[in-house]
Amino acid sequence: MAMWNPWRGCRKCSDGCLHCYIHKGDAKRGVDTSRIVKTADFGKPAARLKNGSYKMKPGMVYTCFSTDFLIEEADPWRGECWEMIRQRQDCTFLFLTKRIERFMDCVPADWGEGYDNVVVCCTVENQQNADKKLSVFQTLPIKHKCITAQPLLERIDMEQYLDGIELVVVGGESDYRARPLDYEWVLDIRQQCIRKNVDFEFRQLGTHFIKDGKKYKLKTKDLCSQARKAGIDIRTRNRVSYT
């Protein structure tokens, strides 16, 4: 698995952004997150060694995990990224976006029904944004689609939007001021995925976690391991591996 962040910086644009780890980390380092700028890794997928082989190994590439691939300020640069993605058919590029409504304005001319080596993950956190974003997402020509409900802020009914979805990822918020995650919300989405034959992953608990009506406060380092221990992930489909 490789990481590729061709630019950095972002702007908060949804309810899930309130305690964004990117903004918190930048604040500690005195970095202005609102400045969207190219990084030294911009050309990473196309970079080659002296023997002509690619520096970046084949496989999954987590793309723009410190920003948003569809953010407006990156419009002048995205075309070059699509060219590198097209060039690297030995890699699968996965990106998350909170700006799915911009998707068709950001794809290359030859996108057609989508690239086989691109996974697009639409992020939602509550029912309002699920209805708004997933109603758009379900209409888009994308070969590989997934949904991330993290941080999950309330019970969400997304079953009507799960046709064509390969994976749903659910998780809580990690911050001392985090909004609580109720385990019942997680199990409810899991049941929706079972009914629609969609893979499901419980990625992490929340700092403030509710189970069977009891409230818990957890350490950040334990959030992912405790989610794995729950043992509720579902792998039912023959899909692209996201790890």
Image (tube, helix red, strand yellow):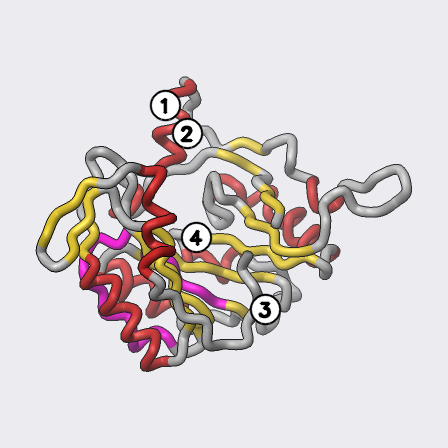
- In-image side of 62 versus 181 (left or right): right
**Dot 2, crowdedness within 10 Å: few (<14), some or many (≥20)?**
many
Task: Pinpoint residue 28: horizontal percent, then vertical percent.
Answer: 37, 21
Q: Is residue 52 within the magenta segment? A: no
Which quadrant holds the C terminus? Answer: bottom right
1 or 2: mark nearer the eye? 1
What distance separates the C-alpha of mark 3 from that of mark 2? 31 Å
Which span is picked out in magenta?
Answer: 145-162
Q: Which residue is drawn at 49% across and 76% down?
A: 237
- In-image side of 52 versus 215 (left or right): right
Of the two numbered discs 3 and 2 on the same chain, state the one appearing first in sequence. Answer: 2
Say which quarter of the image contains residue 199: bottom left
Q: Is residue 150 visible?
A: no
Q: Name the residue under label 1.
A: 27
Q: What residue type is labelled 2?
A: Thr
- Residue 114 is tagged as 3
Q: Mark 4 points at which residue?
A: 97
Task: Pinpoint residue 166: horizontal percent, then vertical percent.
Answer: 46, 71
What distance separates the C-alpha of mark 1 from that of mark 4? 22 Å
